[in-house]
Image (spheres, rainbow, N blue to C red):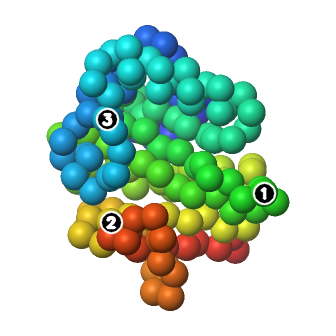
Amino acid sequence: MRFSTQRLILRSLTEYDAPEVLAIRSNASINEFLQRNPPKNSFEALDFILNIKRKTAKNEILFLGISLQNSPKLVGSICLWNFAKDRETAELGYELLPEFHGKGIMSEAVVFILNYGFKDLLLNKIEAFTNKNNLSSIKLLLRNKFILKENRRDEKYTENIIFELNSI
């Protein structure tokens, strides 16, 4: 898959992306608010890519690398995953290298993925789980009309808060 927005290329990962996936997924600033084991080397990043490709083939995830129109280098990723059994709800995930924060890149990618999720995948609801201290992520979700669900709790990660956006 490959999509273009005004400034971005959103595309499927390939095995050649392992060094950039390693840089993104092992970045300490990105991982500050995430509960995951970052890859330790390019082999683990490659394993992650192959796992994403398997899940994509089974329609379990829509995972896209983000690059700028004028550069093939990945600067982040965005995904819809954790689909409900009825395929009407999915969870939004995203990450962006810190040097690209504050430039509207993730906002542009989120607008694209929300439109794709609601119009092409026919989702009724998209959820987003974020750490209560991740102010940049919270602002991004609120700018995109997500609503904080104060009555919902993430049983697995108690520091997370949950946002929802329903289709119009």
Q: Return the mark for residue 38.
A: 3
Residue at (42%, 34%) from the top-left corner? 66
Question: Which quadrant of the view contains residue 131?
Answer: bottom left
Taking the spot 63% from the left edge, 41% from the top edge, the residue there is 61
Q: Quadrant of residue 69?
A: top left
In the depicted structure, whether residue 75 falls above or below residue 46: below
Name the residue: 43% across, 11% down. 16
Q: Say which quadrant the N terminus sits in.
A: top right
Disc 1 target residue: 85
Q: What distance separates the C-alpha of mark 1 from that of mark 3?
A: 28 Å
N-terminal of the pair, mark 2 or mark 3, is: 3
Percent coordinates x, y for residue 91 in the rendering = 57, 58
- Between the residue at mark 2 and the residue at mark 1, the CA separation in whole angstroms equals 25 Å
Dot 2: element: strand
Where residue 152 sits: x, y (%)?
51, 81
Mark nearer the N terminus (2 vs 1): 1
| Residue 139 visible in the snapshot | no
